[in-house]
Every structure is written in structure tokens, then in C-alpha cells.
Image (cartoon, rainbow, N blue to C red):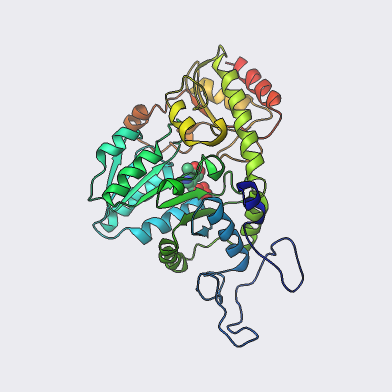
Amino acid sequence: MRRDTIAIHGHGYHDLEHGAVIVPIYQTAIFEHFDREGKLRTTDRGTDLKYSREENPTVRALEKLLAKLDSGEDSLCFSSGMSAITTLFMGLLNQGSKILITEEVYGTTLQLIMDLRKFGIEVHTVYPDTSCIIEKIDKNYDLIFIETMTNPTLKVIDVREVAKVCKEEGLVLAVDNTFVTPILYRPLEDNVDIVIHSMTKYIAGHNDVIAGVLVSSKDTIIKLWDWRRKLGNIISPFDAFMALRGVKTLGIRVKKHCTNAQAVAEFLKEHPKVNEVLYPGLPDSPYHEVARKLFNNNLYGGVVSFRIRGGKEEAIRVMKSVRIIRSAPSLGGPESLLTYPIISASKFMDSELRKRLGITENLLRLSVGLEDVNDIIDDLDDALRNI
Ligand SMILES: Cc1ncc(COP(=O)(O)O)c(C=O)c1O
């Protein structure tokens, strides 16, 4: 099956009794221990099917689909992207473990790992640049954690190169691929060990679900399955159903997000009220070549960041002036969303770090939606004329 087909049929679910075409919502906490033949009910991964904190058929259908979509052996779905990341850290790190993490990762991920230092985990950070990461890698790390494309400055890491070094050194590499999606790039095909997505973004895709997923080998997933069971952070059957519904159109949505974003980036680049546009799809972006190498079909993601002429006051004025675009956090849904990083995901970052990463007071981040791109551009133009 090709990717667009996997997104629709990859769950492999067949309702033998009623022939339902759509995976039903198994809104049940419990399952009878024994089937009609008197055998204990188990799932295809050998775990018991008895209690929805552990396994649920709607969730399982989504997991099978997402594993195939990302070229993994299996996956685990969670109540949020942060639940997925928490489970990864709890499952893979021990007292005294050493983790290397890029200093520009989703803000809450960084806060979480920093807070986990209280359990004796040693955290080392590195500037989000391929050669800086490779230079810092050594055999003593128990986990390397990076994002394919960073937020909000959209730096693209050459995951393929980082994975090669990790493989040589026998290190575990986890990659948050939320901004990029399996449509553009699948890190597991480049020997990455674990892929993470906040499904809240492109995968569920409609700004109406909070969810997360880990995709990996069977062995890693079964180990983390046990942590999900203990942490109790499985996705609900209803949210799994919503994600199954949303993911069907992932391919066409991502393509449209990307082509809209490319047009918006090109428009902003010429705008007199914009100083700089950060978008790997622009040929003069320092990340264009690596993105072109890794991502499929000359598509570069649906998020565009830009620096306006002015400072905090002007940035807030733009946020308040947009009419079709909504001023809200998150990304990856049909609605275009404008975010001001210094009051959002980068709010708790210290000012030195912000400066080093280029998260300035005039930086705005736009998740380009699925509206007619001319309406997005007109809206931005009107809002920028207010400064
Ligand atoms: C790159 C990235 N990873 C993880 C998360 C956390 O996901 P969630 O909000 O679904 O918990 C986010 C949320 O914005 C994100 O942008």
C-alpha cells in the first residue's frame, strides 16, 4: 500500500459481525476475559484485551495504521504529545542516565526533562545544528532527543546524518517529527529508533483532538506499553476515532498546507513590513538544501516564521489585527493560526537562550491553514499595514 492508501485502510480493521466500514468507537472500559472458544482475549501484539487503560480496539486500529504510515513495526497512542514524551522518558531513562537534547525543542519537552533531573537524570543540551549535535554525541549517552524541524525558528536537522553516528555508537535516537509528518519524511527509514508526534497537530489535523504517538520497533513498543499501562495515559477511544477520521486526509492536507505556506513565505519575503522570513522552502534559507534532501516532493512544511519591522508592540498589533487567521497556539489544522512565541511555547525560556536561538520580540509564527491562500495573504497584508 502507498502512503495515502495506508492513511485510509492501514488500520486493517474488519467488522466480521456487521461489516461496518468505519472503525467503531469501542466506548467500553472492560472486556470479557474469555472469547466464544473459551480462550483468553489478547491483541495481535500478545497483550491481554481486558481493560481500556491497557488496550482498546479503536486505539489498536489507529496504532496499526500509524505504525505503517511511519514505516515502523508498532506504535502506541497517548492522551497527548506530552504523554507520549513522558512515557518515553520514564521508560528509557534511569537514575544516572544521560540524555542529550537540542536546546530548541518544544518548550514543555525541555521543561519536563529539566524537571526529571530531580530523579538523577543528567541532561545535556546542544545548539540545534547538525554538526554541533554530531560533535557532542558520545558513547555515554543513554538517549539522544532531537526535533526534525525546530519550533519556532524552523531550523532543519539532518536527521539522516545524526542517525548514522548514533547507529555507529550504538545510541538510542528519538526524533520528534511533529512539524514534518510522515508524508514529508519518515525518520525510521533512516535508522532512527523512535519517532514521536503530537497528533494534536497534522495527524489528527482539525484542531479538535489532543493526542500523541510513539512509533518504533516491536521490542521498544512493548517495553513502553508497560509504562503506558502504569502511567495510565492511553488515548481515549473517542479521540482515537477522531484521529482515525482525521488521518485519512493527511496526504492531501499536508500537500495543501505546504503549497499555501510556500506562497505565504514568498509573499512575506517581499513585504515592506517584514525584515526576515524563516522558511526552509525559500531557496536562500540556510536549511533549504537539507530539507530538500530529506523531505519528499519539494514540500517544506506548513509553518512559516517571520520577523516584522518593529518590536513587541507591533507584534501584538499584528496578532490583534488578523481577521481570518486566528491568534492561537498550535499548528497543523485547517484554520491558519498566528502565534507569538515569546508569550507562548518559548515563554519560560531564559533570555540568553532565546537570543542564541533567534527567538526575538519581533518574531511571529504562522501555521498556514487550508483556506484559499489569497485570503490568508490579504489578511496578513492588512494586518501588517497596521504597523
Ligand atoms: C513539536 C511538538 N512536540 C510535542 C508537543 C506536545 O504535544 P501536545 O500538545 O499534544 O501534548 C508539541 C505541542 O505543541 C509540539 O509542538
Q: Would you say 298 lies left or right of 136 here?
A: right
Which residue is depicted at the point 61% across and 62% down? 61
Q: Residue at x 59, y 47 (%)?
A: 203
The answer to whether residue 32 is left or right of residue 224 is right
Which one is in front, 89 or 61?
Answer: 61
Is 365 placed above or below 54 here? above
Residue 39's image quarter? bottom right
Task: Give the mark count.
Answer: 0
**Quarter assignment of residue 376:** top right
Farthest residue to the top: give it. Answer: 272
- At 62% across and 34% down in the image, what residue appears? 257
Q: Percent x, y for residue 200?
A: 57, 48
Please determine whether, in this image, residue 141 is positioned above or below residue 30. above
Q: Position of residue 194 (x, y in %)?
A: 42, 52
> Foreground: 254 or 318?
254
Q: Where residue 173 sits in the image (x, y, percent)?
A: 36, 49
Quick one: 252 or 317, which is closer to the camera? 252
> Is residue 206 visible to the viewer in this orientation of the structure?
no
Image position of 45 with respect to 197: above or below: below
Q: Residue 336's spot in the image, x, y percent?
A: 63, 33
In the rendered image, which quarter contains the C terminus?
A: top right
On the question of residue 362 being in view, the answer is: yes
Residue, far front: 1
